[in-house]
Image: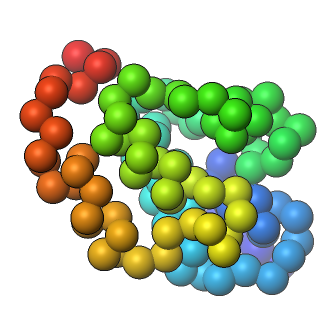
Amino acid sequence: AHGGNPRYIPPEVVMLQDFDGYAADLWAAGVCLWQMVEGIEAPFVWASMEDARYRQLQETKMTKNEGIWNLLQGMLQANPSERWTSLEQIWQQDWMQCTDTRAPSFL
């Protein structure tokens, strides 16, 4: 059995597959980051292609800020083997280094 809010559960857990806890945690952190950046309650209900908003994430660029988009794409890869699993990968992103000095698109 798996606990937690369905909005933060990665696709591999939704599909009842084996999962890496660290990759699952980075997925949940990516969902939280997306919520903060976009100012939305949750980007999708389930990490499943049946969820239209989840499908949109996989098929469409959801934010105008290139730096945050690259970060979110690394953290929210549907395939856990392609998802970033190290903090080094996250910290190396321009958005995390504050080198992208343009004002965020949501301001």
User: On the picture, is 48 further left or further right than 69?
Assistant: right
> What is the x, y in percent for residue 76?
57, 54
Question: Is 20 above or below relative to 66?
Answer: below
User: On the picture, is 102 further left or further right than 43?
Assistant: left
In this view of the protein, can residue 77 be seen by the observer?
A: yes
Q: Quadrant of residue 63?
A: top left
Residue at 26% x, 66% y is 91
User: On the picture, is 1 further left or further right than 86?
Assistant: right
Residue at 24% x, 47% y is 95
User: On the picture, is 2 further left or further right than 37?
Assistant: right
In this view of the protein, can residue 39 be seen by the observer?
A: no
Question: Is 18 above or below relative to 82?
Answer: below
Question: Is 75 above or below relative to 99?
Answer: below
> What is the x, y in percent for residue 13?
78, 68
Number of disc labels: 0
Question: Is 92 above or below relative to 99?
Answer: below
Residue at 28% x, 57% y is 93
Q: Quadrant of the C terminus?
A: top left
Q: Quadrant of the N terminus?
A: bottom right
> What is the x, y in percent for residue 103?
16, 24
- Specify the color scheme: rainbow
Q: Quadrant of residue 36?
A: top left
**In terms of depth relative to the viewer, which is nearer, 35 or 103?**
103
> What is the x, y in percent for residue 10?
69, 61
